[in-house]
Image (cartoon, helix red, strand yellow):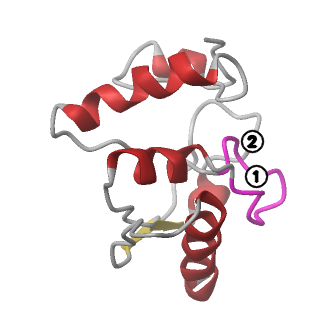
Amino acid sequence: MRLLESKPIAEHSHNILIDANIHLQQTMQYTAQPLKEGSNLVIFPEGARTRDGKLLEFRPFYAILSQTYNIPIIPVVFEGSYEALKSGTLLPKRGKIKITYLKPIYPDDMSYDEINGRVREVIEEII
């Protein structure tokens, strides 16, 4: 697995940095472990920080995990995080960050693309 741009932060916290484009099966097994143990897992579906404050494309990795393990997704909206920690910076600036937890989305009989689209839709409604 290749570490991404937040390596310094991840080395000093409890983060798992992954590149879902490399060794997908191994990555899925590795990241699913907390779910199998009944723990929560936070995944940022964009896979990177925005450079202009707008949502990036959502990658379906989290939707695949949701459907495979039949677990709900709880979309979360962070407002103010772009201003506090812009791409390319290591330390955040002072500012307010509002975090909104949305209603769970259950995978049911949805495809990965449908799950991905639904999560993006509810997040876009807030922002």
Callout 2 secondary element: loop
User: Is 55 one of the magenta-colored residues?
Assistant: yes
Q: Amino acid at mark 1?
A: Thr
**Quadrant housing residue 122:** bottom right
Vertical placement of residue 5 versus 43, above or below:
above
> Dots 1 and 2: beta carbons under 8 Å?
yes
The residue at the point 62 percent across, 80 percent down is 121
Which numbered mark, 1 or 2, is in the foreground of this view?
1
Residue drawn at the location 61% of the way across and 25% of the way down: 6
User: Left or right of 5: which side holds 36?
Assistant: left
Taking depth in this image into account, of 7 and 46 the one nearest to the observer is 46
Which residue extends farthest front?
109
Q: Quadrant of residue 14?
A: top left
Percent of width and height locating residue 52: 84, 59
In the image: residue 113, left or right of residue 54? left
Q: Is residue 87 positioned above or below 78 on the image?
A: above
* Picture layout, residue 14 above or below residue 3: below
Which badge, 1 or 2, is on the more N-terminal residue? 1
Q: Amino acid at mark 2?
A: Ser
Range covered by the magenta-colored residues: 46-58
Q: Is residue 26 visible?
A: yes
Which residue is label 1 attached to?
A: 50
- Packing grade of label 2 (10 A; few <14, some 14-19, many >=20) is some
In x, y percent, where is residue 36? Answer: 22, 33
Q: Residue at x 37, y 65 (%)?
A: 74
In the displayed structure image, the side of residue 124 where residue 57 appears, left or right: right
Return the residue at label 2. Answer: 87
* Disc 1 to disc 2, C-alpha distance: 7 Å
